[in-house]
Amino acid sequence: MKILQNNNKISFIDFGIVEVGESKEVAITVENDSTAYLENLVFKCEGVKVLEAPVRLDPNTSGIVKLLWVPSISLKKPLKAELKVEGIEVYK
């Protein structure tokens, strides 16, 4: 599975610097580049709320994951979060 932001493959999601009391929503693309059907997908990103995500991706299709970060503390550096994906691979 590829994770893309602005059509570029990424390892971490860059939320930038967000002030306490503000929020930032980020949309990324997840692409199933395998021959398996990916089912029962669960997306997790520590400290970040997953607003929307696909639960299934057919082979060679993609979906959008929307994430929301609302910081509770002030950070000096941009937040770079890792997206974790769990699910089942089904070959038909």
Image (tube, helix red, strand yellow):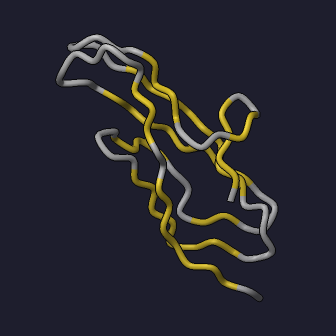
Which part of the image, by quadrant, shows the C terminus?
Answer: bottom right
Which part of the image, by quadrant, shows the N terminus?
Answer: bottom right
| Residue at image coords 72%, 61% | 32
**Residue 60 location, quadrant:** bottom right
Q: Is residue 89 left or right of residue 66?
A: right
Say above or below: 35 vs 33.
below
Extreme-left residue of the structure:
72
| Residue at image coords 41%, 20% | 78
Report the front residue among 46 and 75.
Answer: 75
Extreme-front residue of the structure:
76
Question: Residue 17 placed where, x, y %?
Answer: 39, 14
Q: How many marks?
A: 0
| Residue at image coords 34%, 41% | 49
Question: Residue 91 placed where, x, y %?
Answer: 73, 86
Say above or below: 4 vs 37.
above
Q: Is residue 12 left or right of residue 90?
A: left
| Residue at image coords 18%, 21% | 73
Question: Residue 85 placed where, x, y %?
Answer: 50, 61
Q: Is residue 12 left or right of residue 81?
A: right
Question: Residue 90 placed where, x, y %?
Answer: 66, 84
